[in-house]
Image (cartoon, rainbow, N blue to C red):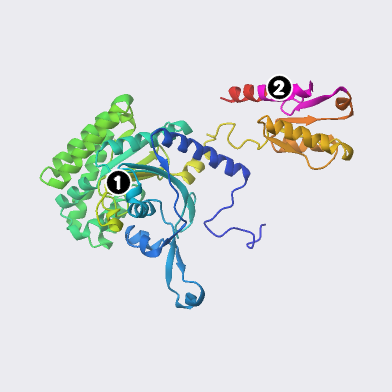
Amino acid sequence: MPSAKTQPARGMRDFLTEDVRKREYVIGVIKEVYERYGFEPLETPAVENIETLMGKYGEEGNQLIFKILKRGVHEGTGEADLALRYDLTVPLARVVAEYRDKLPKFFKRYQIQPVWRADRPARGRFREFYQCDVDVLGSRSMMVEAEICAAASEVLTKLGFNDFCVRLNHRKALTGILAVAGVPLESHDAALIALDKLDKIGPDGVRKEFAGRGINEVAGDRLLNFFSDLNSLEHAAEIVAEDELHEALNRAVLGRLVEFVSDNELGAAGVAELQSILDFTDAMGIANRIKIDPSIARGLSYYTGAIMEINVKDLAGSLGGGGRYDNLVGMFLGQDIPACGFSLGLERILVVMSERAMFPAEAGTASADVMVSIWDDEHISESLVLAQELRLAGLRVDLYPEPEKLGKQFKFASSRGVPFVAVIGDEEREKRQVSIKDMQNGQQHSLLRAEVVEFVKGLLTQRRKGAK
């Protein structure tokens, strides 16, 4: 049993070698896709001034911010002046306000860093975790939403997911729905927080949330009846052929939305923008991934337009989410700058990929292509020279540190997944050769020293091709 003294803090984790390699593999795919879409990297500090974060995430978010107490002579006050980064979006808004004159008119950035939330730890939910964000600032065009949906979809496709959909809604459409249902404006945020839990706690649970938040029973029932009608549409659409399912369902849902909010100017504008996003995603070839879903609200209060979540079939929760937040930067800058972004949940993706055995063979592989063995104390220098030669030729090389029996050295290499072991024994030294032991099939090949690099690289290439 591990001692509590050696365990990380609750909700935090240590990452051993295989975990780190899998994480780096996923991050590598994310970076490669995002950069092909023109996004540029950004990093911000782990710690922000507390006033930067407070008030940006709504009632529930404020309670989950990790606050840092004042230090030194001020420690006894019990007051906090700093806080750990809660997400990557608010720090981005601060950066844009601070460096506005140095940034391009349309600023496209990706950011992959850890964030911290004082949440209750659970399966797949941690207090420290990575977010992988993309954001576009400076444009109000719905093409931005379509491009972000396309980039996030391509990331998941490249990682091996094929059963996901991008659920899409609009805060203006939601505002129209709430107004038509009879929810007063001052209760909209409370209603949305409750509505955001619909897929988790069901209609009865949301009804209780409404009551607890002071939402009129009649208005609450109108809202839930509206969403029950939408569920009926979804069931009816399931009889349509698979390749037409999303198109038929989205058309039906948009029609119902238009019908419900037609007399509400703001709601109608939101529905029109949803239609534009659908048109653009169709042009980008990903319309079959999009599902209009008026039930998603996303609890963060700074969203002003389209809101998005990615869900995988038969998997509770989402793999990421985001939306448009045209007013957030204005909180720092004094003038609004249009912005839209999306965050992939790296931890959730890693958990699902591990459970589904989705990682390719090269993810989590050994840190070395070949291990150079030590024959005896007298000839250690020869092994050192060979290891350096192989490294300079571009191979990843480990060096066994002690002249133990070859059997132990082979066993060590095998336990770490190193595919080849180089041996310079008395016989090899006499013939000016190197023996390469293939740890996969046990075969041993005697080669001239000048042939080793080409031989090992050739076999590595064959195996990587075979793994694909």
Give the residue at mark 2.
455
Q: In the rendered image, which quarter is residue 367 located in?
A: top right
How far apart are the two marked residues, 1 and 2, measured between alpha carbons?
53 Å
Q: In front: 14, or 316?
A: 14
The residue under the point 63% across, 21% down is: 462
Per the image, label 2 sits on a secondary structure element best described as helix
The residue under the point 81% across, 30% down is: 423
The residue under the point 28% across, 44% down is: 138
Q: In front: 1, or 37?
A: 37
Judged left or right of residue 29, residue 99 is left
- Indicate the amino acid at tag 1: Ala
Q: Which residues are magenta?
A: 431-458
Judged left or right of residue 104, residue 24 is right
In the depicted structure, whether residue 44 falls above or below residue 164: below
Mark 1 crowdedness (10 Å alpha carbons): few <14, some 14-19, many ≥20: many
The residue under the point 35% across, 48% down is: 102
Residue 406: % across, % down: 83, 35
Q: Examine the structure image and report whether residue 454 is included in the region drawn in magenta.
A: yes
Per the image, label 1 sits on a secondary structure element best described as strand
Q: In the rendered image, which quarter is residue 311 located in?
A: top left
- Indicate the amino acid at tag 2: Phe
Q: Residue furthest front?
A: 101
Q: Quadrant of the N terminus?
A: bottom right
In the depicted structure, whether residue 335 falls above or below residue 365: below
Q: In the rendered image, which quarter is residue 40 located in?
A: top left
Residue 339: mark in rendering = 1
In the depicted structure, whether residue 196 falls above or below residue 80: above
Determine if residue 57 is in view. Answer: yes
Number of dots carrying numbers = 2
Residue 455: % across, % down: 71, 22
Residue 20: % across, % down: 58, 44
